[in-house]
C-alpha cells in the first residue's frame, strides 16, 4: 500500500469491536471481504457479514459515523438520493447516495453521512449489513424549463364583413 493513496478507516463490526486502519480506495472491496491494513502494518480481510459500516475518517482516534449524528437536520443539499439505511440489528442511519444507479455496487453502498463537519467523511455499508433501504427524498437541480410560448386566442372567423348587406 502506498501511503499517498491509503485512506484512514474505522470499521464498526456487529460484535461492537472497532477496527482502525488503512485501505486502498480502488481495491479494498474484495469478493471475500474488506482488505484492511492495521496501523501496526498487518493486513487482514474482514468478511462482509461481520461489518456494520466502514467510515472513511479524518482522524483514526476520532468517532466513526455511528458515534456522530445519524439523521439530517434538514433536507440534504447535495444532489442525490436521501435514504435511510436499516441495519440487521434494528439500527438506522440516514445518508445521501448518488442519483446515478449505475454507481450502486453489488457489494454495498458508498454514501455521504449527515454530519459533514464530523470525523466521518464518507461511509461504505456492505449489503450483508442491511435489512432495508428506504428512499426519503430525491435532491437535485431542477431541469431547465423550456421557454413557454404564449397561447394565442383562436381567431374568430367572420361570416360577413361590416360593409356587406344581405
Image (tube, grey):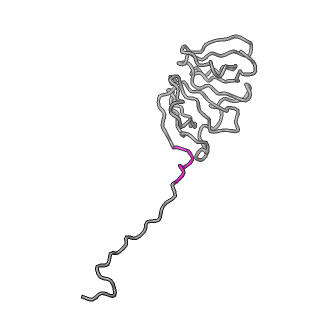
Quarter of the rendering containing residue 164:
bottom left
Task: Work out whether residue 65 or residue 23 is closer to the camera in this orientation and state it.
Answer: 23
Q: Quadrant of the C terminus?
A: bottom left
Identify the residue at horizontal 37%, vertical 70% (top origin). Answer: 154
Q: Position of residue 40 (x, y in %)?
A: 74, 13
Q: Position of residue 39 (x, y in %)?
A: 74, 16
Task: Work out whether residue 15 or residue 77 is closer to the camera in this orientation and state it.
Answer: 77
Identify the residue at horizontal 56%, vertical 45% (top origin). Answer: 140
Determine whether 155 is above or below 128 in the image.
below
Q: Is residue 37 left or right of residue 88?
A: right
Q: Quadrant of the N terminus?
A: top right
Would residue 45 be counted in the magenta stretch?
no
Determine whether 44 is above or below 166 in the image.
above
Q: Position of residue 145 (x, y in %)?
A: 52, 54
Identify the residue at horizontal 64%, vertical 31% (top origin). Answer: 122
Identify the residue at horizontal 53%, vertical 49% (top origin). Answer: 143
Q: Is residue 146 left or right of residue 124?
A: left
Give the residues drawn in magenta, as a range: 138-145
Q: Residue furthest left?
A: 166
Q: Position of residue 16 (x, y in %)?
A: 60, 22
Quarter of the rendering containing residue 97:
top right
How many callouts does the rendering have? 0
- Magenta span: predominant SS is loop
Determine whether 130 is above or below 154 in the image.
above
Amino acid at each position: 500500500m502506498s501511503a499517498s493513496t491509503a485512506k484512514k478507516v474505522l470499521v464498526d463490526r456487529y460484535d461492537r469491536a472497532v477496527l482502525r486502519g488503512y485501505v486502498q480506495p480502488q481495491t479494498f472491496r474484495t469478493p471475500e471481504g474488506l482488505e484492511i491494513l492495521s496501523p501496526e502494518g498487518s493486513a487482514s480481510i474482514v468478511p462482509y457479514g461481520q461489518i456494520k459500516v466502514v467510515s472513511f475518517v479524518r482522524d483514526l482516534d476520532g468517532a466513526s459515523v455511528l458515534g456522530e449524528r445519524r439523521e439530517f437536520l434538514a433536507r440534504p443539499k447535495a444532489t442525490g438520493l436521501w435514504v435511510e439505511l436499516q441495519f440487521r440489528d434494528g439500527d438506522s442511519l440516514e445518508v445521501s447516495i448518488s442519483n446515478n444507479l449505475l454507481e450502486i455496487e453489488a457489494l454495498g453502498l458508498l454514501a455521504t453521512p449527515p454530519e459533514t463537519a464530523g470525523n466521518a467523511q464518507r461511509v461504505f455499508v456492505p449489503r450483508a449489513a442491511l435489512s432495508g433501504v428506504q428512499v426519503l427524498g430525491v435532491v437535485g437541480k431542477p431541469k431547465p424549463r423550456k421557454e413557454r410560448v404564449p397561447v394565442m386566442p383562436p381567431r374568430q372567423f367572420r361570416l360577413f364583413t361590416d360593409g356587406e348587406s344581405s
